[in-house]
Amino acid sequence: MLANQYFKKRTYGFRSFFHDAFKIMKNSSQIRKIMRSGRISEQFRERIMLAVTAVNDCIYCEWSHTKAALSSGCTEDEVVEIMEHDFGSCDPEEVVALAFAQHYAETEGIPTDEAWDKLVEQYSNQKANDIMLLIKMITVGNLLGNTIEAFGSRFKGKPPENGSLLFELFIYMFGWPFILILNRKIKKKAKRID
């Protein structure tokens, strides 16, 4: 197959999924504390989610986090700019975190030491760790969504280059109820726009 005939988005395999899922489950109580603590506002959290999603290109996360960002008070212009990797209209206090989130996704979870040091310098160790956990959480969501999309793409003649049909089926079966509901909402929204 030619390179352009493959599904190009980053997806999960067995090992990477279980590794990341274990880490998220291990930190689930910390994630709940972050959500309740107020150290990171809902708007800031959604901007972080969008910055990662813009790189990983998960259609499901893009839709749901765009909606959540707008509901939290982000403007349409902010959302569009973040999805275009532009943080110019965002709060200047948040730009370092958004750039780090983008960098984390672009480096597939291996940010440079300099980028991490800048994040800690800007926000403190506690808040930087909170931001990192949110980034890891949305990355799991993005890659799950992309893996589900890759499964459907196989039947359109564009399989992922290094995918596993068995694993994609497993993830699809796990996520299909959520994806069906989300697909209906996306289609309704698209009809209203037309």
Image: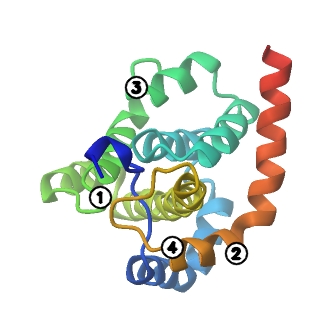
Q: Secondary structure at mark 4?
A: helix
Which quadrant would residue 169 be assigned to in this image?
bottom right
171 over 81 or under it: above or below: below
Question: Disc 4 or 3, which lies upstream in sequence?
Answer: 3
The answer to whether mark 4 and mark 1 are in CB contact below 8 A is: no
Residue under label 3: 87
User: What is the spatial separation of the Cα atoms under label 2 and label 3, in whole angstroms?
Assistant: 35 Å
User: What is the spatial separation of the Cα atoms under label 4 and label 1, in whole angstroms?
Assistant: 22 Å
Q: Position of residue 102 (x, y in %)?
A: 35, 43
On the rendered image, what quadrant is the C terminus found in?
A: top right
Give the residue drawn at x 47%, y 21%. 81
The answer to whether mark 2 and mark 4 are in CB contact below 8 A is: no
User: What is the spatial separation of the Cα atoms under label 2 and label 4, in whole angstroms?
Assistant: 14 Å
Left or right: where 49 falls relative to 180: left
Q: In the image, what residue type sits under mark 2?
A: Phe
User: What is the spatial separation of the Cα atoms under label 2 and label 1, in whole angstroms?
Assistant: 24 Å
Question: Disc 4 or 1, which lies upstream in sequence?
Answer: 1
Q: In the image, what residue type sits under mark 4?
A: Leu
Left or right: where 164 falls relative to 29: left
Residue under label 4: 165
User: What is the spatial separation of the Cα atoms under label 3 and label 1, in whole angstroms?
Assistant: 20 Å
- Identify the disc placed on residue 141: none
Circle 4 or circle 3, nearest the eye: 4
Residue under label 2: 174
